[in-house]
Amino acid sequence: MVGVGVLIGDDEPIPDLMVVTGSIDWNGRGVPVGQVALAVEVVSKSTTLQDRLVKPVLYAQAGIPTYWRFEINPFKGCLAGEELPVLFAYALGTDGEYEQTHRASAGDPVTLRSPYEVTFDPGALLPR
């Protein structure tokens, strides 16, 4: 199945997961950006640049309120004792850029309150 994109002007990035509000036209071209409450990316070796640098800027400029990134492979900046996957959660700041709100690794349950309150262990969400 082809992924569903977020309609941002002429762009249509495809997140690995998104949480949307309202009903979706499954026959349409994609999801209007105003309906996207959360965009989630799982960084793989082939999508590293896009998921870490390009998509977050695009999502923030479009006003998507929350962005989560899961690192599933060893990465520069991994902290001692962190186990993969590592979740980086961001919320849109008043300056229109994402601000990191949480960082949690496998075995470290985290409670996030945006876009909805949820508690989970990043290690339980993705296969190791």
Image: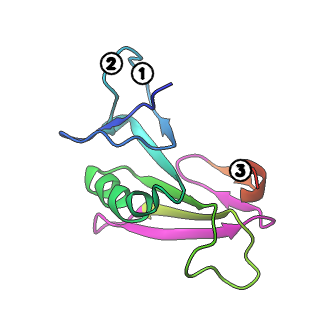
Q: Mark 3 points at which residue?
A: 126
Report the colour scheme: rainbow
The alpha-carbon separation of the residues under discs 3 and 2 comes to 29 Å
In the rendered view, tell whether residue 94 sits above or below residue 64.
Answer: below
Task: Out of 41 and 74, give the one closest to the viewer.
Answer: 74
- Front disc: 2 or 1: 2
Where are the magenta residues, as a range? 92-116
**In the image, what residue type sits under mark 1?**
Ile
Residue 84 location in percent, x, y?
Answer: 71, 66
Mark earlier in primary sequence (3, 2)? 2
In the rendered view, tell whether residue 25 sits above or below residue 21.
Answer: above
The alpha-carbon separation of the residues under discs 2 and 1 comes to 8 Å
Answer yes or no: is residue 88 visible: yes
- Residue found 62% across the figure and 79% down from its top: 78
Residue 14 location in percent, x, y?
Answer: 40, 40
Task: Out of 20 and 18, give the one closest to the viewer.
Answer: 18
Marks 1 and 2: in contact by CB < 8 Å? Answer: yes
Find residue 10 and name its label: none
- Residue found 43% across the figure and 64% down from its top: 52
Left or right: 60 in relation to 127 = left
- Residue found 40% across the figure and 52% down from its top: 65
Mark earlier in primary sequence (3, 1)? 1
State the residue lying farthest toward the top: 27
Q: Name the residue under label 1.
A: 24
Residue 13 location in percent, x, y?
Answer: 34, 43
Q: Name the residue under label 2.
A: 28
Residue 42 location in percent, x, y?
Answer: 55, 53
